[in-house]
Structure formats: structure tokens, C-alpha cells
Image: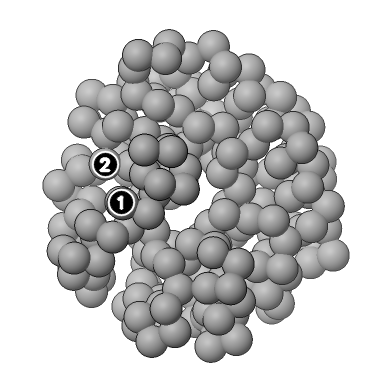
Amino acid sequence: MYDFHTHSLLSDGCLLPSELARRYEEKGYKAIAITDHVDISNIKRVVCEIETFCKNWPKKRIKVLPGIELTHVPLEQFSKLAKYARKHGIKIIVAHGESPVEPVIKGTNKAALNSDIDILAHPGKISKEEVLLAKKKNIFLEVTARKGHRQTNSHVIKMARIYGANLILNTDSHSPENIPTPAALKQLGIKAGLSPKELAIIYRNLQKIFLNT
């Protein structure tokens, strides 16, 4: 079981990366990405710190991938910031999509999808054009456990099914109480509308693309 959208105190989470990893490990997860919020003001610091952490994390324990979440950035900065992160070793680039519960600027989904990202998080009422772009670029559309953001999960699933885009199930965790057991996370995905077969496909895709297994 994997979660590729989590936050530590490197941004607005409340746990050190080491405790975040340990809590996921204790719950039975095999791999996570730590994807703290960045914009142009803090990307250099966060990329450096999460890279240092991941390089020094014990290899025989839960796998921890270095990530970021590009959050509320001006549309014209997405490509530049994604390129910087990728150049400096970030493996999972998440973009903060047009959630129904935050004032995300219109056009964020499209700008993010046109840059070098891996996951479009909580994309809200994503359009046909955006879903087709995600499919073309092999970008995952997120089904989220996060309260508020998850209001549009069923729409995201429906659109991905119709147009053939890849889905991913994540928690967007910020604190210990946001970390469900793997079984509970799967159940949330099923409640949102994913089938057991779709969940199996999601995890197979993640293994192949991000974990090389």
C-alpha cells in the first residue's frame, strides 16, 4: 500500500519527516512520498531538506520518495518550478489542483498538466480537456481522503473512466489522525466509487512507474 501525497513540518504538516515515515511504516504501508507545499519562495529550501532526508533514510525500512506539492503558484511559474524540482532530484511532483474548497485560480489544472508533474491533486470539477491532457501525459488524477477536497472524488473518477486517465488514491495527510490504515484508505476509495479492480490497477501502475517493481 502506498501514499504519494503527504505533508511534514517542512511545510504545514505537524510531524518531522522521520516520524511521518515511521507512522506510515507502523500502519503497514510499503512506500510514501513526502510532498510538502512549495512556491517560488521556499522551493530551494524544501527540495534540499527532503532530498537530504530521503538520501539518509534506511534502505531496509519503508521506502520514502522525495516530493513536493506546487501550491497556489502563479500559472506562468508551474513549468519553471517543476523543472527546478526535477533537476534537483525530486521524484514525485504533485500540483495542487482546483479544489472546491480553496480559492485556487482558474486555469491551475491546465497550467499544471502542461508542466512536468506526476500527480494532479484534488482537481475539483476537472474538464474533459484536462482529463484528456492528463491521459496524454500519463499524469495521475487524485482521488483524495482529505476532508473538503474529497467532495469531487466521484466526478474525478467518472471523468477518468470515460476518457481513460490514470487515477491515484492518496490521503493528503498533515497530522497523525490523517493517516488511515491501508484497509481504511481502500475502503474510502471504494466509497468514492472505485472498484476493487480499479484499486488493483492503481497500485500496479504505481509499482511500475514510481517503484520500478
Q: Is mark 2 on a helix, strand or loop?
A: loop
* Residue sitting nearer the eye, 77 or 64: 64
Looking at the image, residue 58 sits to the left or right of residue 112; the answer is: left
Q: Which residue is label 2 attached to? A: 1
The answer to whether residue 120 is left or right of residue 51 is left
x 55%, y 86%: residue: 127
User: Which x, y percent locates residue 26?
Assistant: 23, 24
For the residues labelled 2 and 1, the Cα–Cα distance comes to 7 Å
- Please tell me in which quadrant of the rendered image residue 23 appears: top left
- Circle nearer the N terminus (2, 1): 2
For the residue marked with disc 2, what is the amino acid? Met
Is there a contact, CB below 8 Å, between mark 2 and mark 1? Answer: yes
Q: What residue type is labelled 1?
A: Tyr
Camera-nearest residue between 100 and 140:
140
Q: In which quarter of the image is the C terminus?
A: top left
Q: Quadrant of the N terminus?
A: top left
Q: Name the residue under label 1.
A: 203
Q: Element type at marker 1?
A: helix
Residue in the image at 79% along x and 42% along y: 84
Give coordinates of residue 145: x percent, y percent: 33, 57
